[in-house]
Image (cartoon, rainbow, N blue to C red):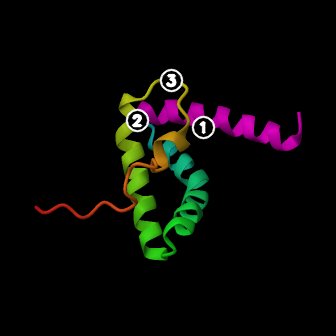
Amino acid sequence: MSNVSKEMVNRQADDRQLVARAKKGDWAAFEELVKAYQRPLFAYLYRLCGNTAEAEEVAQQAFVKAWQALGGVQAGVQFQDLALPHRHEPLHQPAQAH
């Protein structure tokens, strides 16, 4: 197994452990996940929309949505599956009227 492959396997194992801890309400574990995925998620979103402010806003929404979804996920889920917007979802959710 190459070093890159080992790193990916280790990252996935770490993610599963962090997701399990975050699911139990461990905010520090969720912060670790956000730190690990913030830059790659922003870069991905920026490539899609080409706008810094919009990419930042969508990334923020994605992390909030991931936090809210934690309670309903099964063991072993990857954080990237919670945080990445799905293809059928619009990138930006309009602000809701109060």
Q: Residues within 10 Å of mark 3 (few under 14, many from 20)?
A: few
The range drawn in magenta is 1-25
Indicate the quadrant where residue 95 lies.
bottom left
48 relative position to 90: left or right: right
Q: Residues within 10 Å of mark 1 (few under 14, many from 20)?
A: many
Task: Check if residue 19 falls in the magenta segment.
Answer: yes
On the image, the x and y values in percent for residue 92 come to 36, 62
- At horizontal 42% and vertical 71% (from top left) the residue drawn is 54
Q: Nearer the viewer, residue 51 or 37?
A: 51
Q: Nearer the viewer, residue 15 or 22?
A: 15
On the image, the x and y values in percent for residue 12 come to 66, 36
Q: Earlier in the sequence, mark 1 or mark 3?
A: 1
On the image, the x and y values in percent for residue 39 come to 59, 61
Farthest-out residue, right? 2
- At horizontal 55% and vertical 57% (from top left) the residue drawn is 41
* C-alpha span from label 2 to label 3: 10 Å
* C-alpha span from label 2 to label 1: 13 Å
The circle drawn on residue 88 is none
Task: Check if residue 29 falls in the magenta segment.
Answer: no
**Residue bearing the label numbered 3:** 75
**Residue bearing the label numbered 1:** 15
The residue type indicated by label 2 comes to Leu
